[in-house]
Amino acid sequence: MERATFGAGCFWGVEVELRNVPGVTDAAVGYLGGTLESPSYEDVCSGSTGRAEVVQVEYDPERVGYDELLDVFWRVHDPTQLNRQGPDHGTQYRSAIFFHAPEQQLAALASLAREQARTPGRIVTEVTPASTFYRAEEYHQRYLVKHGRATCAI
């Protein structure tokens, strides 16, 4: 199994989309980037931690490629919105690809270049090394499923 981590706004809808990709064996929402250790949701929402809401997936590279996960990432959000998605504002909602290996970094940068070539406006997605992933509180895990919703309307 391999890991991939993406920030694309509110993590609830992104988690559903990534979890539903064949070959993804697990997905968890949490926080990555920034400085505060063991942040809470309230800490992250304060905007003072530098952390982003992210989805970290485990996937079987024999069943799904990293490039396919990148395609889902680009599809589920607007990468031209700086520090926001829809009505959600703040650095915690930034567009980000957190890479776990040099190969992921190269693939992410190539994917970003391809996406920029077909996207009007400047893409603001950051591509940065993954640091410590802090799993979000349990009530955030599979939030939409727990509440009988298939998607998160923005």
Image (tube, grey):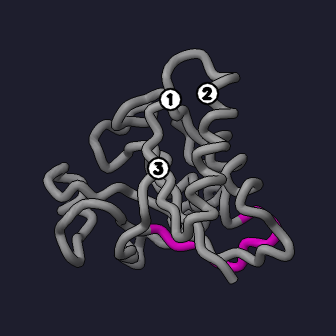
Label 3 CA crowd tier, 10 Å (few <14, some 14–19, many 20+): some
Query: Which of marks 2 and 3 precedes in the sequence?
Result: 2
Residue type beneath disc 2: Gln
Query: Which residue occupies the extreme right position in the image?
Result: 63
The residues colored magenta run 20-29
The secondary element bearing badge 2 is classed as: helix
The secondary element bearing badge 1 is classed as: loop
Residues at discs 3 and 1 in contact (Cβ within 8 Å): no
Q: Position of residue 80 (x, y in %)?
A: 48, 27
Secondary structure mainly formed by the magenta segment: strand
Name the residue: 81% across, 66% down: 64
Residue type beneath disc 1: Ile
Residue 127 is tagged as 3
Residue type beneath disc 3: Val
Q: Position of residue 77 (x, y in %)?
A: 57, 39
Residues at discs 1 and 2 in contact (Cβ within 8 Å): yes
Residue 110 vertical position relative to residue 106 in the rendered view, above or below: above
The secondary element bearing badge 3 is classed as: strand
Residue 116 is tagged as 2
Name the residue: 61% across, 54% down: 106
Label 2 CA crowd tier, 10 Å (few <14, some 14–19, many 20+): some
Q: Quadrant of the N terminus?
A: bottom right
Residues at discs 3 and 2 in contact (Cβ within 8 Å): no
Where residue 120 sits, quadrant-wise, is: top right
Where residue 104 sits, quadrant-wise, is: bottom right
Q: Position of residue 25 (x, y in %)?
A: 71, 79
Q: Is residue 97 left or right of residue 32?
A: right
Mark 1, residue position = 123
Spatial CA span between label 1 and label 2 = 6 Å
Query: Which of marks 2 and 1 precedes in the sequence?
Result: 2
Residue 42 vertical position relative to residue 59 in the rendered view, above or below: above
Name the residue: 71% across, 61% down: 66
